[in-house]
Amino acid sequence: MASGNNAKARSQERERARRYQARLAYQAGLGRRRTRDNLIAGIAGGILILAVVGGQIAYFGVGPGAPEPSGTPTPTVSPTSDVTPTPEGTPDTGATETPTE
């Protein structure tokens, strides 16, 4: 009867080894999947960030968020006063007094 128990033990050992190899393959597959998913997420996140930055640049550079162009200031000519010196040396403001009667 020893040989019957021995065959059963070998069969159980083979089954344990098969399940162990299956678990190892499963875990290796999960590791590859995680690596692939992280790579895809990194690329998608980078593209998203570039799109957001590009959109901000476009909006504030040439779109409706762009500042209104201001015209170049033109030199203004200051109005000349009609001040003429009077014989007494005081400037004439151009206003003449009307004599009151």
Image (cartoon, grey):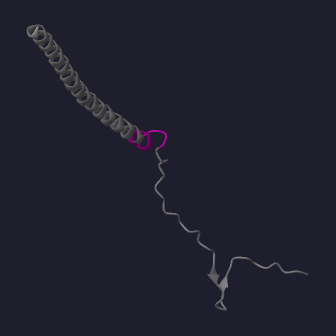
User: Is 101 located above or below residue 4 in the figure?
Assistant: below
Residue farthest to the left? 3
Q: Residue at image x 18%, y 24%? A: 24
Location of residue 25 (image quadrant): top left
- Which residue is at the front of the view, 25 or 92? 25
User: Is 44 located above or below residue 86 in the figure?
Assistant: above
Image location of residue 54, percent across then percent down: 36, 38
Count of numbered circles in the view? 0
User: Is 90 located above or below residue 1 in the figure?
Assistant: below
Image location of residue 45, percent across then percent down: 33, 35
Specify the quadrant that holds the N terminus: top left
- Which residue is at the front of the view, 71 or 2? 2
The residues colored magenta run 57-65
Location of residue 89 (image quadrant): bottom right
Image location of residue 62, percent across then percent down: 42, 40
State yes or no: residue 61 in magenta: yes
- Which residue is at the front of the view, 74 or 68? 68
Residue farthest to the right? 101
Specify the quadrant that holds the C terminus: bottom right
Q: Residue at image x 35%, y 34%? A: 48
Residue farthest to the front? 1
Left or right, residue 19 beside residue 82: left
- Which residue is at the front of the view, 39 or 47? 39
Left or right, residue 74 beside residue 88: left
Image location of residue 41, percent across then percent down: 31, 31
State yes or no: residue 50 in magenta: no
